[in-house]
Image (cartoon, grey):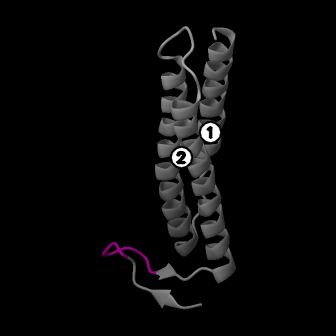
Amino acid sequence: MTTTESEVPGSAADTEPDYRFTLANERTFLAWIRTSLGLLAGGVAVHELVESSRIEFAHLALGTACVALAFVLAVGAYQHWRTVQSAMRRTHPLPRPVLVPVLCVGVGVIAVLAVATMLFS
């Protein structure tokens, strides 16, 4: 393993992690980005293709929720990638995943909005 100086002056030197772990971290990041892109496409499709229901803002709220969750996941994926990469370089424990509960709650909210939109159509 090679050792490089830390980005923060005065802290312990970082070590280069095994490339397999770095690539696994990158694949996880890309999986979150794919999920985010799917939600973004779904939000745009709902906004453009779904007919308005009796509740005027229902499909707009559904599309907006998809796009907002896509944004949160994309930003969170980058933050998680950086945090995991930093922890591996410093041989610290890996952080707990925050995006999994965010995705579960977000998809739950979108599902409730979708059911409400279908019921009131």
- Whether residue 93 is visible here, answered yes or no, is no
Image side of residue 13 versus residue 17, left or right: left
- Amino acid at circle 2: Leu
> Badge 1 is on which residue?
103
Determine the secondary structure under disc 1: helix
Pick whichever, 84 or 116, lies toward us.
Answer: 116
Residue 86 point in image, percent of width and height: 50, 68
Q: Is residue 107 above or below residue 75?
A: above
Pick whichever, 39 or 50, lies toward us.
Answer: 50
Residue 34 point in image, percent of width and height: 62, 55
Q: CA distance from mark 1 to mark 2?
A: 8 Å
Instruction: Name the quadrant containing residue 111.
Output: top right
Give, as a single range, the part of the protein colored magenta: 7-13
Image side of residue 51 versus residue 10, left or right: right
Categorize mark 2 by other alpha carbons within 10 Å: few (<14), some (14-19), many (20+).
many
Residue 118 point in image, percent of width and height: 68, 16
